[in-house]
């Protein structure tokens, strides 16, 4: 994001909402009796050697109350307009460069302020809670936004399994930085690996999820397969992709973007229309997928999730804790 680009590619081919809704009805019908079928979902992940090429449906997931009336960003935009610097710095790079990335098998290490260090594989993560669809508004600090039907499980379920100690005040998420599979990780645009973090109460908030899918399908590589963080009231850069390590700590983690530009990127990164980024206004946003001449819309405090998360920041000066 520190890198200046004149224009980003906006794909012109789109999947209509009607198509998606039709597909979703079929998925729902097929998956109705499979709610406890983590084995079926596990099977999908085992076969998911190359999600960027072969799209795979997730058969069993619950609907949730979040965002049902939002107009969804077309699938092709969600999956071809990405920030994922391990695969290049252009928005169009990740969809192309992540084609050979292998998100399976996958193990996540749990470390730091926990009863004991341990590891958990994707299959076992998927058994921690039923998968749910969450339609969230996503706002990037660069001034654009999307509405994405994620599929995932509450991060709180994974944290409970991890058994953090009373010393755990923060939780850090570390992305894979594999120079063989991720060509961008050979280039020092960021201090690899990509690290993000949350305060424990933010991590435990019911809105925070680990996403393993979108649009009814296994998460494409370019969107962070096999598992990425989604925190809808914060700028998109908080959502670390391809997470391989979760570390609990007493002190605030040093996150990749704060290290790269401490005056531009804060640890909290809450969507806040009243506090501008030095280079981009945060008071309005451009919804991706609406065409070049679509009017910008007003950005909402905490991206519209004030009711759910506003109390987490009561008494804090949000212009200092940006
Ligand atoms: N995670 C990793 N590992 N590497 C990245 O470069 N980019 C972040 C975030 N997670 C990034 C990352 C940024 S800046 C944004 S806006 C979101 O991913 C974009 O997520 P999306 O491509 O699924 O929309």
Image: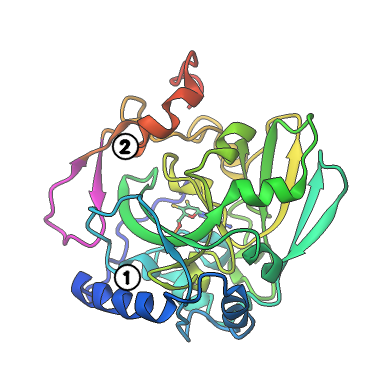
Q: Which residue is mark 1?
A: 75
282 or 16, which is in the foreground?
A: 16
Q: Is residue 301 left or right of residue 15?
A: right
Magenta segment boundaries in residue numbering: 284-297
> Do the residues under discs 2 and 1 have CB atoms within 8 angstroms?
no
Please tell me whether residue 309 belongs to the stretch shown in magenta: no
| Placement of 119 over or under 215, stated as above or below | above
Q: Main secondary structure of the magenta part?
A: loop
Question: Mark 2 or mark 1, which is nearer to you?
Answer: 2
Residue 269 visible, this angle: yes
Q: Is residue 49 left or right of residue 283?
A: right
Residue 195 visible, this angle: no
Question: Looking at the rendering, which quadrant does residue 273 occupy?
Answer: top left
62 or 103, which is in the foreground?
A: 62
- The span from disc 2 to disc 1 (Cα, nearest Å) is 22 Å
Q: Residue at x 50, y 16 (%)?
A: 316
Q: Is residue 144 left or right of residue 105?
A: left
The figure's colour scheme reads: rainbow
Q: Position of residue 271 (x, y in %)?
A: 39, 35
Question: Looking at the rendering, which quadrant does residue 192 occupy?
Answer: bottom right
- Mark 2 / mark 1, whichever is N-terminal: 1
Q: Residue at x 68, y 34 (%)?
A: 170
As drawn, the label of residue 252 is none
Please tell me whether residue 296 belongs to the stretch shown in magenta: yes
Q: Which residue is mark 2?
A: 304
Counting other residues with Cα less than 10 Å from the Cα at mark 1, is it few (<14), some (14-19), or many (20 or more)?
Answer: some
177 or 111, which is in the foreground?
A: 111
Q: Position of residue 149 (x, y in %)?
A: 37, 61
SS at circle 2: helix
Q: Residue at x 42, y 39 (%)?
A: 233
């Amino acid at each position: 994001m520190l890198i200046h680009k004149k224009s980003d590619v906006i794909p012109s081919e789109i999947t209509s909402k009607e198509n998606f809704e039709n597909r979703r009805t079929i998925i729902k019908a097929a998956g109705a009796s499979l709610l406890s079928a983590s084995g079926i979902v596990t099977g999908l992940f085992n076969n998911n050697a190359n999600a960027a090429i072969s799209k795979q449906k997730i058969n069993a997931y619950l609907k949730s109350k979040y965002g049902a009336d939002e107009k969804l960003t077309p699938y092709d935009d969600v999956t071809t307009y990405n920030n994922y610097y391990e695969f290049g710095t252009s928005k169009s790079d990740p969809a192309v460069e992540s084609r050979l990335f292998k998100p399976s098998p996958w193990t996540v290490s749990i470390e730091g302020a926990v009863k004991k260090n341990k590891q958990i594989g994707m299959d076992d993560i998927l058994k921690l809670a039923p998968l749910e669809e969450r339609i969230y508004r996503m706002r990037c600090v660069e001034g654009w936004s999307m509405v994405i039907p994620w599929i995932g499980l509450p991060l709180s379920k994974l944290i409970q399994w991890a058994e953090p100690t009373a010393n755990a005040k923060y939780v850090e998420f570390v992305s894979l930085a594999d120079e063989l599979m991720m060509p961008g990780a050979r280039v020092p645009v960021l201090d690899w690996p990509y690290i993000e973090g949350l305060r424990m109460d933010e991590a435990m908030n019911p809105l925070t999820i680990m996403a393993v899918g979108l649009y009814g399908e296994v998460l494409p590589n370019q969107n962070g397969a096999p598992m990425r963080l989604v925190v809808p009231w914060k700028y998109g850069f908080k959502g670390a992709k391809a997470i391989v390590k979760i570390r609990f700590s007493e002190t605030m983690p040093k996150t990749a973007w704060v290290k790269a530009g401490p005056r531009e990127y804060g640890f909290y990164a809450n969507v806040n229309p009243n506090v501008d980024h030095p280079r981009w206004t945060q008071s309005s946003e451009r919804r991706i997928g609406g065409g070049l001449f679509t009017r910008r819309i007003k950005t909402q405090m905490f991206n519209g999730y004030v009711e759910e998360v506003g109390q987490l920041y009561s008494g804090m000066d949000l212009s200092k804790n940006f």
